[in-house]
Image (spheres, helix red, strand yellow):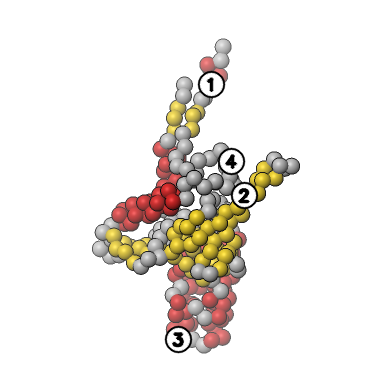
């Protein structure tokens, strides 16, 4: 018996493409640290503000070390420009276009390959995860730079839900309103597809799964079960 599986792969790809589209509520501890910075930036001494900023910076680094990039991006983007003093300016959020450069180095002796990725935000080239960026080219990104590394979610734009059920989204070209969150999700999926089409034909990095079809579209998986009762 041959079973063709498509739905699971499509759902996984869609979910990954929309990761970070809307900010999740900050966890209680993260919220306390963020609120302390915002309060002291508005009405506090420089010394107290720097202490709070150092706590926030330590939390950002801890989230990145734990590979909790989505929570780190939420925390970074939550702080407004008016509060970015001292150590609170060490992380630089970015929503918009960026140039991505992925390089694959084959190691014949080891029988494998290694991929590296760099992202150009404004004028700076920053290291990035080749798990997130697999193909070179221009694409919209949502993330932040910290310690010479750019950390990004999968979503191509950032949205905020409004009280009327709609959403305001920014992909780097100014805010755009959508009548519903579903329409915002559809716009994000379309933006991801456009970026993929623009880079189609470029060589995938083969960083994680050498036989996947991540950058070219959906894949068809043939499952042939061998049950003990079928063996004679």
State the separation of the CA atoms marked 4 and 2. Answer: 12 Å
Which residue is rendered at x = 47% and y = 82% of the image? 41
Q: Residue furthest right?
A: 109
Asked if the residue under mark 3 is in contact with the one under mark 2, i.e. CB atoms within 8 Å, the reply is no
Mark 4 lies on residue: 210
Q: Position of residue 112 (x, y in %)?
A: 67, 43
The reply to whether residue 156 is visible in this rendering is yes
Residue farthest along the front direction in this orientation:
201
The nearer-to-camera label among 4 and 3 is 4
Earlier-in-chain disc, 1 versus 2:
2
- The residue beneath circle 1 is 227
Q: Nearer the viewer, residue 136 or 151?
A: 136
Instruction: Measure how far apart labels 2 and 3 are at the Cα level.
Output: 50 Å
SS class, disc 1: loop
Mark sitting earlier along the chain (4/2): 2
Q: Is residue 20 visible?
A: no
Q: Are the residues flagged by discs 1 and 4 in contact, CB closer than 8 Å?
A: no
For image coordinates 53% across by 76% down, the residue present is: 89
């Amino acid at each position: 018996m041959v079973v063709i599986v498509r739905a699971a792969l499509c759902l996984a790809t869609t979910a990954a493409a929309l990761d970070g589209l809307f900010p999740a509520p900050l966890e209680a501890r993260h919220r306390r640290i963020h609120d302390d910075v915002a309060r002291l930036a508005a009405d506090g001494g420089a010394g107290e503000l720097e202490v709070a900023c150092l706590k926030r910076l330590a939390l950002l680094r801890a989230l990145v070390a734990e590979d909790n990039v989505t929570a780190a991006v939420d925390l970074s983007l939550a702080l407004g420009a008016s509060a970015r003093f001292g150590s609170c300016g060490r992380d630089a959020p970015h929503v918009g276009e960026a140039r991505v450069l992925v390089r694959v180095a084959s190691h014949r002796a080891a029988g494998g390959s290694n991929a590296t990725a760099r992202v150009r935000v404004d004028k700076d080239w920053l290291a990035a995860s080749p798990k997130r960026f697999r193909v070179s080219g221009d694409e919209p990104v949502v993330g932040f730079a910290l310690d010479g590394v750019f950390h990004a979610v999968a979503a191509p734009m950032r949205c905020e839900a409004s009280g009327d059920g709609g959403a305001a989204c920014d992909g780097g070209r100014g805010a755009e309103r959508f009548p519903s969150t579903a329409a915002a999700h559809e716009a994000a999926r379309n933006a991801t597809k456009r970026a993929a089409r623009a880079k189609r034909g470029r060589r995938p990095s083969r960083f994680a799964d050498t036989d996947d079809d991540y950058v070219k579209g959906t894949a068809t998986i043939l499952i042939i079960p061998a049950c003990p009762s079928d063996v004679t």
